[in-house]
Amino acid sequence: MALSALSKYLGIHDDFKRLREKYGIKWSVRDNIPTILLNQNGFTGLLARAREALSILSSRKEIIMFLALSGLRVEEALAAVKIFHEKGEKEYLNEELGVLEHYRFPEVFMRRTKNAYITIIDDYMLDLLKKAKPVSYDSIRQCFRRKSQSKCSFHVFRKIWATYMRYEGIEPEVIDLLQGRVSKTVFAKYYYRPDLKPLLEKARALLPKLRIILEES
């Protein structure tokens, strides 16, 4: 497994796979204990860390709250703010569906292993985008370190978003889509063809409540 990871890093993974198949090299992976069993207060703990970050980074509240409500990765959320200001609302926002269309900018959002396709937004998030000033990831991390002794893991917001949406009945396939993952199940790949707009509206209706939960002290 270590050699496989190294071959990817060196850019010769295809050659490695051919050699592995030629000589019949195989390995087994031991089943891991599900994370949900190791941290029974997962959502509560994540909320505490997220609220701490929002409090410490109050000067960057627009960006941090947009990150929290979008479900995006940190780099993607920061890129979204930058593109919104550079390209403008008309080039980025699909008003009919109420989503930011990241796929219009594949050079930024369509990467080898991590993608972002669309993000649902409401009027509050649109206002956040207009007020937020584009900043770098390093700038946010340094700001947090100056004001706190702990290390902030900004990915807690993405985990909160996914867990909350599932709590409220949003289908895993929809959560995957909105977080830039494409399900590999046969069902999702070949058979799941829902009307998109009602699903987006259902998820969007949950954003105000999520905002309240995050801002509770």
Image (cartoon, helix red, strand yellow):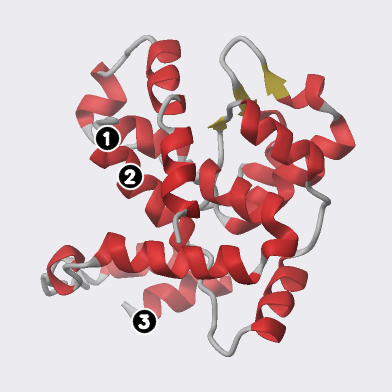
Residue visible at 63% across and 72% down? 56
Q: Amino acid at mark 2?
A: Tyr
Quadrant position of residue 60: bottom right
Please tell me in which quadrant of the rendered image residue 139 appears. Answer: bottom right
Q: Are marks 2 and 1 in contact (CB under 8 Å)?
A: yes
Q: Position of residue 163 (x, y in %)?
A: 31, 48
Q: CA distance from mark 3 to mark 1?
A: 39 Å
Name the mark on residue 2: 3
Read off the residue under disc 2. Answer: 164
Could you say where residue 38 lies in the image, as x and y percent from the top left?
16, 74
Which of the marked residues, 2 or 3, is nearer the chain's N terminus?
3
Task: Confirm or deny contact between disc 3 and disc 1 (CB under 8 A).
Answer: no
Amino acid type indicated by mark 1 = Glu
Give the labeled residue for mark 1: 168
Please tell me whether mark 3 or mark 1 is closer to you in this view. Answer: 1
Asked whether residue 76 is in view, the answer is: yes
Helix, strand or loop under label 3: helix
